Amino acid sequence: MDDQLLAPAMYRASVRFADDAIADLPAAIADALDRGRLRPEPGSRIAVAVGSRGIHALDRIVRTTVDWLRARGAVPFIVPAMGSHGGATAEGQAEVLASYGITERTMGVPVRSSMETVRLDSDGLDLDLFMDRNAWEADAVLLVNRVKPHTDFHGFPESGLLKMSVIGLGKHAQALAVHGRGIRGLKEFILPAARRILATGRILGGLAVVENAWDRTMRVQAAPADGIEPMERDLLSLAATTMARLPLDRIDVLIADEMGKDVSGTGLDTNVIGRIRILGEAEPAAPVIRSILVSRLTAASHGNAIGVGLADVITRELYDAIDFAATYENGLTSSFSERVKIPYVAPDHAAAVRAALRFAGLHPDPAVIRERARIVRVRNTLELSSLVVSAAAAEALRGTADVEIDAEPLPLLEAGRLAPWR
């Protein structure tokens, strides 16, 4: 069947989100650290814990933090705090940080990446506790992370400083210990484990970041170890109200141009696509998306395609970019097998669109597809302010507050590939 007959005309849709990003980020970070009651001792060696999430301006955030510590006479260095990411190797984790612009040269301090851990006292926890040896042997640790809703469950804590103190700093050993208990490990063990780690006296404090719907920093806040938990509770509530969401609750086909670890810890943000795919964990009520197509893997993922199983169709281009060792290690560590299952692999973009439409259970008549198919195209699940939607989706969006739809139609496919963004 002719691809142009099959693919309906598309229309650009602009979604207006509140643009409340911090204008002077370094100044805001320094102010937050000043107000956060953090008291690094002159000459103390401070391990700055940095994770693998795609946080906006992470290099500036970390550099400002390092400079703040040095200005107070401390001797900071950076440690990767990312559990089993980076292929669960020291080299891989250093490469992840380097891909965000965080190196010894750019930060002006050493980056000490190691998978070696120290076993901590876990008596009464029913869970072994570990910490990165470099961090443990420092005089103190300063956690730097974003607070946001988790992609596996909802409760407290979700993604943030507390989870980083456990799984991030605990490296592969801690990730295995927590994830080996499935979703229960995340929901029941993170908080008591984090409290035990904070009570060791090794944590100086934390710098928390909250991003707005544009994925730009809207809040930075710092607290000493004993203030991290209440601070994170407040910031998680804020983050849940500010994250971007798709403007439709029912979609036949969602096309994501890319997925990756720098987009979400699960490649595709489960809070956006309405799919968790964890046995025993309830699926979100909305949105309901009948078929998801993803065309490529981001370079910053370094081949880690965790979350690929959340899609229904991928292209051969994406499949060929997968580092199966890194992907499977992340999947095995998490214990969520659905996330690493390989979907239908289409040889090219046009074939991928055809397959996605069929998996959505749409009537094969091209006229019906053009008239009724709700198709939404996004760059990725982080960037949701600019969409391309089919006529049926555009009609469903008309009258929606903060959504504007262009009148000029756009092609979905050009020369057998997804049309370039215009």
Image (cartoon, rainbow, N blue to C red):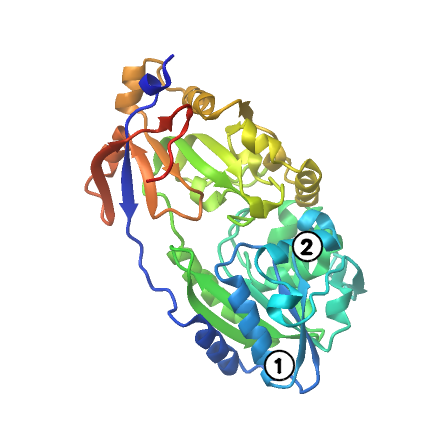
Q: In which quadrant will I find the C terminus?
A: top left
Q: Earlier in the sequence, mark 2 or mark 1?
A: 1
Q: Is 406 drawn above or below residue 110 in the view shown?
A: above
Q: Is 102 drawn above or below residue 327 in the view shown?
A: below
Q: CA distance from mark 2 to mark 1?
A: 24 Å
Q: Residues within 10 Å of mark 2 (few under 14, many from 20)?
A: many
In the rendered image, residue 291, in percent from the top left (x then y), is placed at: 44, 28
Q: Residues within 10 Å of mark 1 (few under 14, many from 20)?
A: some
Q: Is residue 127 left or right of residue 342?
A: right
Query: Mark 2: which amino acid?
Result: Gln
Check disc 2 and report the residue beneath it.
93
Check disc 1 and report the residue beneath it.
70
In the rendered image, residue 274, in percent from the top left (x then y), is placed at: 45, 40
Query: Mark 1: which amino acid?
Result: Arg
Q: Residue at x 64, y 67 (%)?
A: 105
In the rendered image, residue 30, in percent from the top left (x then y), is placed at: 49, 78
- Determine whether label 2 and label 1 are within 8 Å by CB: no
